[in-house]
Amino acid sequence: MTALVARNYSFHMADSKGSANLDQELKRLEKRLEELVATVHRLKEENRALRQRQDNLAAEKTTVMNRSEQVRARVEAIIGRLKAMEHTA
């Protein structure tokens, strides 16, 4: 081999190794990007579900508080009637 042919051959071999490394790196990055996209989709769905759960719990809390207030008012009314019965008896 002449020096010029040897130099071109070596450059071609190094270039193909670099290209293979670049391809591997691109595939690794592509796989990582796909994983990140899947994670984002999963987190968005989880966030949506958590917000829905939070809304449901807030509505349930309001219902419980309203019922509690109704029960308190009934108990106070019963106590008031009992006190009135005590005074008349």
Image (spheres, grey):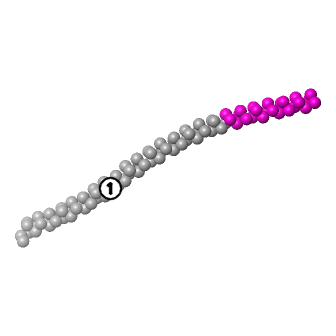
Residue 74 lies, in percent from the top left, at: 76, 32
Residue projecting furthest to the bottom: 1
The quadrant holding residue 56 is top right
Residue 73 lies, in percent from the top left, at: 75, 31
Magenta region, main secondary structure: helix
Residue 10 lies, in percent from the top left, at: 14, 67
Question: Few, some or many C-alpha atoms within 10 Å of disc 1 (few <14, some 14-19, many ≥20)?
Answer: few
Look at the image and give the residue range highlighted in magenta: 66-89
Residue projecting furthest to the front: 89
Give the residue type that dot 1 points to. Lys
Residue 36 lies, in percent from the top left, at: 38, 51
Please identify the quadrant where the N terminus is shown.
bottom left
Please identify the quadrant where the C terminus is shown.
top right
Residue projecting furthest to the left: 2
**Residue 34 magenta-drawn?**
no
The quadrant holding residue 63 is top right
The residue that appears at 92% across and 29% down in the rendered structure is: 87
In the displayed structure image, the side of residue 67 where residue 39 appears, left or right: left
As drawn, 48 above or below 85: below
The residue that appears at 31% across and 58% down in the rendered structure is: 28
The residue that appears at 71% across and 33% down in the rendered structure is: 70
Q: 26 and 51: which one is in front?
A: 51
The residue that appears at 11% across and 64% down in the rendered structure is: 8
As drawn, 28 above or below 67: below
In the displayed structure image, the side of residue 26 where residue 11 appears, left or right: left
Q: 44 and 27: which one is in front?
A: 44
Q: 10 and 25: which one is in front?
A: 25
Secondary structure at numbered mark 1 = helix
Reading the image, the residue beneath label 1 is 31
**Residue 74 magenta-drawn?**
yes
As drawn, 8 above or below 89: below
